[in-house]
Amino acid sequence: MANEEPVTPADNLVTTRHTMADGQAYTATTGTMVLREEAFTDGRSDGHRARAEVFVTAYTLDGADPLTRPVTFAFNGGPGSSSVWLHLGVLGPRRVVMGDAGSLLPPPYGLVDNAETLLTESDLVFIDPVSTGFSRAVEGEKPDAYHGFTGDVESVGEVIRLWTSRNERWMSPKFLAGESYGTLRAAALADHLQTRHGLYLNGLLLISSVLDFITGEFNPGNDLAYALYLPTYAAIAHHHGLHGDRPLADVLREAEDYASRDYPWALARGNRLTDRERAEAVSRVAALTGLSPDYVDRVDLRLEHQRFFTELLRSRRQTVGRLDGRFTGWDADGGGEIYDRDPSMSAIMGPYSAALNHYLRAELSYTNDLPYEILSGRVHPWSYKEFEGAHVHVTGKLAAAMRDNHHLRVHVACGYHDGATPYFAAEHTFAQLQIPRELAGNVEFKYYEAGHMMYVHEPSRLRQSADLAAFIRAALP
């Protein structure tokens, strides 16, 4: 029997029609788009070769004018995360119901209309980078080229260019929404899309922002991270009752003041501190973080974040979450230095996985027998070869994009209990942004009493939804 010819990869998109909670009709288009790359042999073009199939879900409001209707391209981070969190957590027309810290619902959880969906203000396109969701390299191709900073930015940028062109949306106002590593991707994309394709954006929605990795690197010789995490430690301690009845705002103000001045000074002084100065620093850090003075002294005033999450409630035999310090869990070893699992990740993985796998098949009519990679480890090791000899940062790219496009606006959403991308670190990063003073007003910050995925906290979800909608409206020409 003759060998069968390989199947040429082709777009596989399914279209369905729905109605929002407010009665407006919209169209959902979900499935894979083929990414192609022009190949050359001896300087001659071999045509455009298929390299990868990228999974997208797009929502467009029926009857809207594409010249005035905004479109927002959204993705999460990881690296290795699908877009499920923003999709079903806060932005999309349907959302997960899972409960919250201390009151989680049992499986199989729930999926309901999202009355606060951003679709009321903007069309939405959710993108799963290669090796996440249903996105894969095509048969015979290696995915490694997409598992790194530049390959990731270029491939996601190509999806955005293709979708914009095929749907005749070049004249639409355009936004990017990224969460966590997705904020770093979004900032880099703002510059890449402008310089490579001349595609200028109206705004960036940066949720749980991390644009400069040095702010979270607990390495010898880098004391910056210890100071920038201190207010988050104080917020988590406050949530768990270790600051009595003091208002959170008062605790944060004290922690921020100390982290801005006296704490960095004490860390920099090192063994030049007098006994009195060291004792004062130990006492202050312990009071702010809820840890014992003995522990603070033993770690030399330097509180590494994962050790903090394990130590804070050790007397209760509990750990606290990294993504969201409001969540608690139990480890098999109550004396361990690092927790076995992040209890906040354990809390959200099941609800979002169940909802997504049901939703795509039962409501969007898309079927695929591959596992939907919610959060994949297959992308690692992730390549940062572009930053060899330096820490990973994209502040320069964002600043360049803002200087070239002075209409570009940036929304930064922060959770006080986020131990992955602390709010004080985001403030520090944006304070170093090299833009003229007249562009400083293009950046806004919003804060929530929740964690990394602040929308799992219902009051925060409602406020955040309103804040995002207001940002889109304000950024329109």
Image: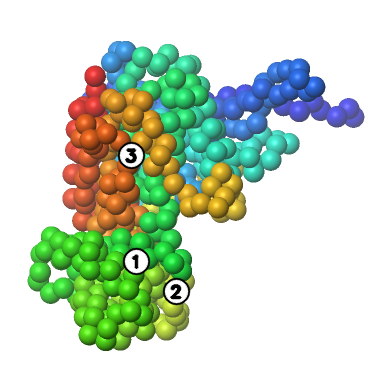
Residue 205, visible in the rendered structure? yes
* Earlier residue among tags 3 and 2: 2
Q: Which residue is mark 1?
A: 226
Count of numbered circles in the view? 3
Type of amino acid under label 2: Ile
Distance Cα–Cα, label 3 vs label 2: 37 Å
**Decide: marks 3, 2 in contact (CB < 8 A)?**
no
Q: Element under label 3?
A: loop
Picture quarter containing residue 407?
top left
x and y, in percent, of residue 241 in the image? 18, 73
* Earlier residue among tags 2 and 1: 1
**Decide: marks 2, 1 in contact (CB < 8 A)?**
no
Type of amino acid under label 3: Gln
Identify the residue at image location x=36%, y=36%: 399
For disc 2, the neighbor class at 10 Å (few under 14, some 14 to 19, many from 20) is: some
Type of amino acid under label 1: Tyr
* 365, 114: nearer the viewer: 114
Q: In the figure, 366 relative to 270: above or below? A: above
Q: Quadrant of the N terminus?
A: top right
Any mark on residue 338, and which?
A: 2
Q: Which residue is mark 3?
A: 434
Identify the residue at image location x=39%, y=46%: 211
Residue 92, visible in the rendered structure? no
For disc 3, the neighbor class at 10 Å (few under 14, some 14 to 19, many from 20) is: some
Q: In the figure, 218 relative to 140: above or below? A: below
Q: Element under label 1?
A: helix
Horizontally, residue 263 falls left or right of residue 8, namely left
Which residue, as the protein is rendered here, is positioned at the far right? 1
Picture quarter containing residue 216?
bottom left
